[in-house]
Image: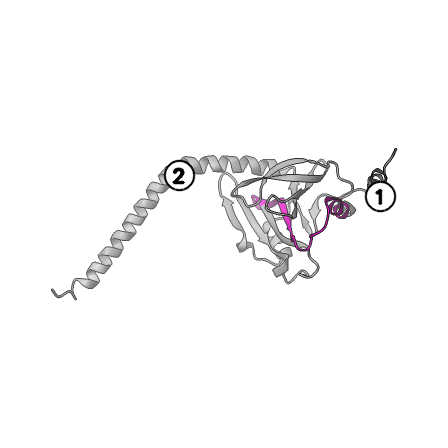
């Protein structure tokens, strides 16, 4: 016997398919297109390019730009459910977008609610469950529970449930640029690890020279005035 729940789920996916019959465009998130350069993204977000953080310089330039719509003059804080968005750049080109939704503005929403909303823009998801590993900050890797994924031959968007609490997020990738960036990041970590001992020697040497000069300056200032 077919349950009411089964009928409801079937109806839900039929509606998504009908609403998405015109296809999907995964090349952008809002007005931010994959492949756009950092100055263009910064301008769209109402930020300055200098606000981007350099994650790695070699063998490729990897940068991140944090955007908080709630503090942006170009958005409506009352309506925007996004808490922050992290744009990642490979040699100046946007290759990854991580969207973190405001938990207060998504409170009570189910996974089906989120999928329905995103499917209105990106079409029906191509995958509903699984895990993905990615870095939210460029510092540590996080394993997030993927609820649904939308993808084509060039781009992908994954809706995930945050491991840091009852909140949702979304990861967008350029399939052309992301592998290049990941390869560069792995090599950058290797280079930095290899060069770390020499950098520490240079840091200590520089600190020692600075301390010596400070002591000499203090000596020149204090010696003539010293009275036993």
Residue 98 image point, x, y percent? 62, 46
Q: Quadrant of residue 224?
A: bottom left
Q: Secondary structure at mark 2?
A: helix
Mark nearest the camera among 2 and 1 is 1
- The structure residue drawn at horizontal position 61% and vertical position 47%, both measured from the top left corner, is 165
Can you identify the residue that label 1 sits on?
15
Residue 87 image point, x, y percent? 60, 48
Q: Quadrant of residue 13?
A: top right
Q: Residue furthest right?
A: 1
Instruction: Specify few, some or many for label 2: CA neighbours under 10 Å numbering under 14, 14-19, or 20 or more.
Output: few
Q: Secondary structure at mark 1?
A: helix
In the image shown, does 176 or 12 lie closer to the viewer? 12
Magenta-tinted stretch: 89-118
Q: Is 65 placed left or right of 78 in the picture?
A: left
Q: Are marks 2 and 1 in contact (CB under 8 Å)?
A: no
Can you identify the residue that label 2 sits on?
196
Q: Is 32 placed left or right of 11 in the picture?
A: left
Mark 2–mark 1 Cα distance, whole angstroms, equals 56 Å
- The structure residue drawn at horizontal position 35% and vertical position 42%, both measured from the top left corner, is 200
Q: Is 51 placed left or right of 177 in the picture?
A: left
Residue 161 image point, x, y percent? 65, 43
Residue 178 image point, x, y percent? 61, 38
């Amino acid at each position: 016997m077919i349950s009411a729940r089964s009928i409801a789920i079937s109806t839900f996916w039929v509606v998504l398919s009908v609403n998405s019959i015109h296809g999907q465009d995964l090349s952008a998130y809002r007005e931010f297109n994959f492949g756009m350069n950092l100055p263009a993204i910064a301008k769209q977000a109402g930020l300055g390019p200098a606000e981007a953080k350099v994650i790695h310089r070699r063998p490729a330039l990897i940068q991140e730009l944090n955007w908080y719509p709630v503090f942006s003059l170009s958005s409506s804080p009352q309506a925007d459910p996004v808490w922050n968005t992290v744009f990642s750049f490979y040699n100046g080109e946007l290759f990854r977008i991580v969207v973190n939704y405001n938990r207060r503005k998504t409170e009570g929403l189910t996974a089906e609610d989120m999928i329905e909303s995103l499917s209105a823009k990106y079409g029906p998801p191509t995958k509903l469950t699984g895990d993905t590993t990615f870095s939210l900050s460029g510092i540590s890797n996080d394993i997030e529970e993927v609820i649904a994924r939308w993808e084509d031959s060039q781009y992908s968007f994954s809706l995930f449930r945050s491991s840091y609490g009852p909140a949702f997020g979304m990861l967008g990738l350029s399939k052309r640029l992301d592998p290049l960036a990941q390869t560069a990041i792995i090599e950058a970590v290797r280079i930095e690890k290899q060069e770390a001992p020499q950098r520490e020697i240079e840091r200590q040497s520089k600190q020692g020279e600075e301390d010596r000069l400070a002591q000499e300056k203090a000596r020149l200032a204090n010696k003539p005035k010293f009275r036993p």
